[in-house]
Image (tube, rainbow, N blue to C red):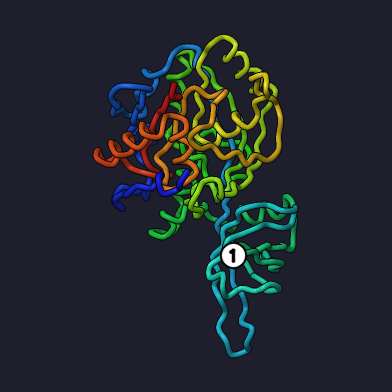
Amino acid sequence: MRVDLFDFELPEELIALRPARPRDSARLLHVPVRGAFEDRIVRDAPSLFRPGDLLVFNDTRVIPAALKAIRPSRDPQGAVVRVSLNLIERIAPDVWRALAKPGKRLKEGDGLFFDGGLFAKIEAKDEEGAIALRFDRSGEALDEAVAKIGAPPLPPYIAAKRAPDDEDRGDYQTIYAAKDGAVAAPTAGLHFTDELMAQFDALGVERAQVTLHVGAGTFLPVKAEDTNAHVMHSEWREISPQTADAINRAKAESRRVIAVGTTALRSLESSVGKDGRVRAESGGTDIFITPGYRFRVVDGLWTNFHLPRSTLFMLVSAFAGFERMKSAYAHAIAHGYRFYSYGDASLLWRAE
C-alpha cells in the first residue's frame, strides 16, 4: 500500500509532553466494531470488559538509555564536542548500537568519555547514521554504569521540546515493568494504576504477561513510499509457557484476548502456529502488520494514538479497519485527545 495513505495532519498542541495525573485520569476513546465512538475516561474502562477476558501486558522495563558524552578535540587548539546519545540495540555484552548527535562530527575510532569514568570507542557507523560503541566494561558492570548516568530515552517529539527529568523516571515506566531491556516504553501500559488493576481483578478479568524489549524504531515514520519497501526492525520477545497456556485456554473457551499495546499484540501474532495455538518461545520478531493481515490471536487492542505514516498506525488500521481508524483519528483530533507516548488511550476491537 502507498504509505501516504496513512498520513494525517495533527495540531502540534495535541502532542502530549507530560502524562495525565493520575495515570487513569487520561481519556479513552472506545472504538466499537460498528456504531458511534464513545468518549470515556481510563478509570472507567472496566465497564467495557467482561468476566473472563484476558488482558496481556508487556512487562519490559525501560533502561535509562539517554546518555551524554564528550569527544576530545582532534586538534590541540580545538574545542571538545558534546555528544547526546540514545542506546538503541545491544549487540554484545560490551557493545551497543546508538544514535548520536552531532553524528556528522563523529568518526570510527573516536573515543567518548562519559560521567563516572565510563569510556567507549566508536567501532563503526552505518548508513542510517547509527554508531557501534564498544565500552570499557560489559554485562552487569556496564548495566550498572548506564543506570547511574543515563536518563529516560524520551521520544524525539518530546525530547526536542524539553530535557528528561526526575519525573520521567517514573512517568516513562509502567507500574508492572519487570525485565530490563527496552529503549522505549510500551506506552499503552502507562495508563494503568494499581487501583485500575484491582477493578479488573474484581470484575474477573484475567492477566498475563509477555516480554518485548521495545526498540527506538517502533515509533519512527516509514520513509519508503510503499509499505512493501519498508524493512521492519527486529525486537526481542519472550512468551512463557504459562502465558501461552493462558491464551490458548482463553481462545478454546471463546473468551476475548485483549493486548495492552501494539508490542504485546505483535508478540502474540508472531508466535501463533498453523494450528492457531500460541507457542511458548523467545527470540526476535520483525512482524510488519498492514491492512490485509489476518489476525489469529488478539480480539481487542488497548493502545495510544500513533504518529502519521508509522508502522503502528498501519497496524491499528489493519486491526480495526482502515476507514474506521481514519474516522477515529479525525474524531480524536476534533475532540482534543492528546497524542503519542504520554497521550490518551484508545480501545479497539478487531474488525469483522
How many marks on residues?
Answer: 1
For residue 41, above or below residue 254: below
Q: Looking at the picture, how far across and down is residue 95, in whole percent?
A: 71, 58
Q: Is residue 321 visible?
A: yes
Instruction: Compare residues 126 and 352 and report the one nearer the observer.
Output: 352
Q: Looking at the picture, how far across and down is residue 182, in whole percent?
A: 59, 45
Tell me the residue at 58%/54% (across/down).
65
Tell me the residue at 57%/34% (across/down).
266
234 with respect to 167 (left or right) = right
Looking at numbered disc 1 in the image, what kind of residue is underneath it?
Gly
121 with respect to 55 (left or right) = right
Which element is circle 1 on? loop
Residue lying furthest bottom: 77
Q: Is residue 183 visible?
A: no
For residue 61, above or below residue 95: above
Q: Dot 1: within a 10 Å radius of its alpha carbon, few (fewer than 14), some, or many (20 or more) residues?
A: few
* Residue that badge 1 annotates: 129
281 with respect to 13 (left or right) = right
Residue lying furthest left: 334
32 with respect to 123 (left or right) = left
Q: Looking at the picture, how far across and down is residue 179, in whole percent?
A: 63, 38
Q: Looking at the picture, how far across and down is residue 45, in whole percent?
A: 37, 23
Residue lying furthest top: 253
Instruction: Compare residues 262 and 96 and report the one nearer the observer.
Output: 262
Q: Quadrant of the C terminus?
A: top left
Tell me the residue at 51%/39% (across/down).
186
For residue 251, above or below residue 173: above
Tell me the residue at 37%/50% (across/down).
17
